[in-house]
Image (cartoon, rainbow, N blue to C red):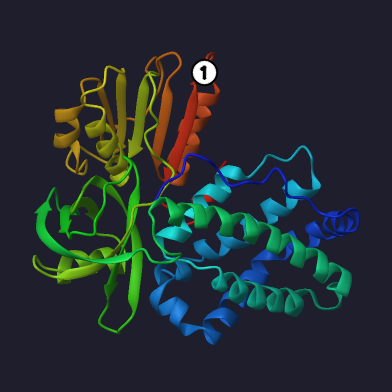
Amino acid sequence: MHVSHTPETKAVHLSPEHEATIKATLPIVGAHINEITPIFYNKMFTAHPELLRDTFNRGNQKQGEQQKALAASIAVFAQMLVDPNAPDPVEMLSRIGHKHVSLGITPDQYQIVHDNLFAAIVEVLGDAVTPEVAEAWDTVYWLMADVLIKFEKDLYDSADVEVGDVFRRARLTNKQALNDAVSLFTFEAPALTPAVPGQYTSIGVVLPDGARQLRQYSLVSAEQGRWVVAIERDGEVSSFLHDAVSVGDEVDITLPAGDLVLHEGENPVVLISQGIGSTPMVGMLAALQDSEREVVVLHADESMDTYAQRAQTLELAKNHHEFFRSEGQRLSIDGLIPSGADVYLCGGTGFLQNVRDQIAALDEQPAAVRYELFSPNDWLVS
């Protein structure tokens, strides 16, 4: 699922009355957002336990990262509506939209979120939520929801599927260990379609307690009928895939999504990754094999042994630079970014922010910088 356009935010506006109310109340809502979100999720999962069991990753919920992401995204959207100098959160919305379609989210679920979120806001802020305040924030929520619903419909349409119809059954046909923590999993099914290099899929497994849990994995390759993903043993879904799913078993797998994709053109390409973040880069590298574009690969890892996709990367990349923490090395882009390059980043939040700081310090900026993070709140980094 992929489209060339981004979510449409240019035509989204508040009335002068609602804008004034949001400006006045944004500080108090922002100050209490960490109180509001746990109450919201508790209310929603109490009323709809199937969402925690079958849709939301409960590991992320325990850590609280996904909760922070939702609350902060609404605040960021509200800021755009009331501050002409605020950045357009179109990249944030695009990443949210792609995550949503990878989970099969449907418009009716926005109503569930709305009802429980606003009940939590009222519980925390009490009398501060006057009818005027409730109406203004209700408008903000539905403006954002409408932007996302339309964008997600476009993504579903791009794959010629009904809204939410993204799950397919696929059989595991090969499992190859790359090191002690990472293995390549090959899934096959006639319904698996080609992906744009760099995209990911959600894989769902039924755990021993009966919960169908989902997690996204970048696609190393995605041909018609045959997909390969690299899975690091980390969390209950990944551990279950390593320990309990054998060749011949079937899992739920979704159509490809994700907006960190290889863009066509003649610009040099720079692929920068950390750890398992090498996975989408390998997919892009494979797609660039017949291209005349200059390609530079930079990768950071704990050690040569933990660099799971090193052999595959070395086979595909002519200009490859690696940095290992065990040897006291930190990834440096100094002198390695060609003029006018398209830069792609994938890794942890701290790593990504460090690399972006290095890029910002360059005398000549790249033509474009695109990124994907490991964390569920990746859309908050802009």
> According to the image, label 1 marks what residue?
362
In the rendered view, does 251 fall on the left or right side of 154? Answer: left
Viewer-side residue, 360 vs 6: 6
Which kind of residue does numbered mark 1 sit on? Leu
Q: Is residue 364 above or below residue 285?
A: above
- Which residue occupies 60% across, 72% down? 113
Residue 371 visible:
yes
Q: Is residue 23 above or below residue 135?
A: above
Q: Quadrant of the C terminus?
A: top right
Q: Residues within 10 Å of mark 1 (few under 14, many from 20)?
A: few
Residue 306, image x, y percentages = 21, 44
Q: Quadrant of residue 58?
A: bottom left
Residue 130 visible:
no
Residue 362, image x, y percentages = 52, 18
In the rendered view, does 181 fall on the left or right side of 293? Answer: left
Residue 2, image x, y percentages = 42, 46
